[in-house]
Amino acid sequence: MASNNIVKMTGDESYSTATIIKNNDVTTSEVINEDDKITSHDLQEKQQQLEQIETFNLFSQMGVKLSDALDHLFSNILTKITNSVASVLT
């Protein structure tokens, strides 16, 4: 319907669906199969390569160290506060 309206508006028959279908000898499934050249074997190889590569993420490592430091700091602060409160109450 859209191509028929375009033909009516432009007067150009090259937009006709009949012309497009005649010019297109390749089916959609053939186009998809030609473009889809990645196989499951290729994906398995890439996955193995990624597993073998040890990546180092600087920000991740910095975050882990910062988290550990803050955990240790607040643990010590809470221990001192708890000991102070306990000594005052006893």
Image: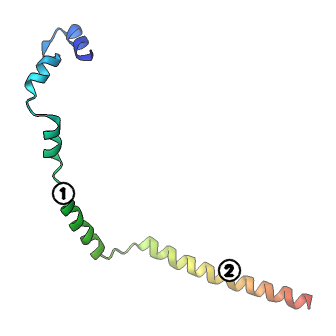
User: Considering depth in this image, is 23 or 55 the residue closer to the camera?
Assistant: 23
Residue type at numbered disc 1: Thr
Q: Position of residue 20 (x, y in %)?
A: 13, 22
Q: Nearer the viewer, mark 2 or mark 1?
A: 1
Q: Quadrant of the C terminus?
A: bottom right
Q: Give the residue drawn at x 56%, y 80%.
A: 68
Which element type, helix, strand or loop, lies under badge 2? Answer: helix
Q: Which residue is mark 1?
A: 39
Q: Give the residue drawn at x 26%, y 15%.
A: 1
Q: Which residue is mark 2?
A: 74
Q: Residues within 10 Å of mark 2 (few under 14, many from 20)?
A: few
Residue type at numbered disc 2: Phe
Mark 2 to mark 1 CA distance (whole Å): 52 Å
Q: Earlier in the sequence, mark 2 or mark 1?
A: 1
User: Considering depth in this image, is 4 or 28 the residue closer to the camera?
Assistant: 28
Q: Residues within 10 Å of mark 1 (few under 14, many from 20)?
A: few
User: Considering depth in this image, is 77 or 46 the residue closer to the camera?
Assistant: 46
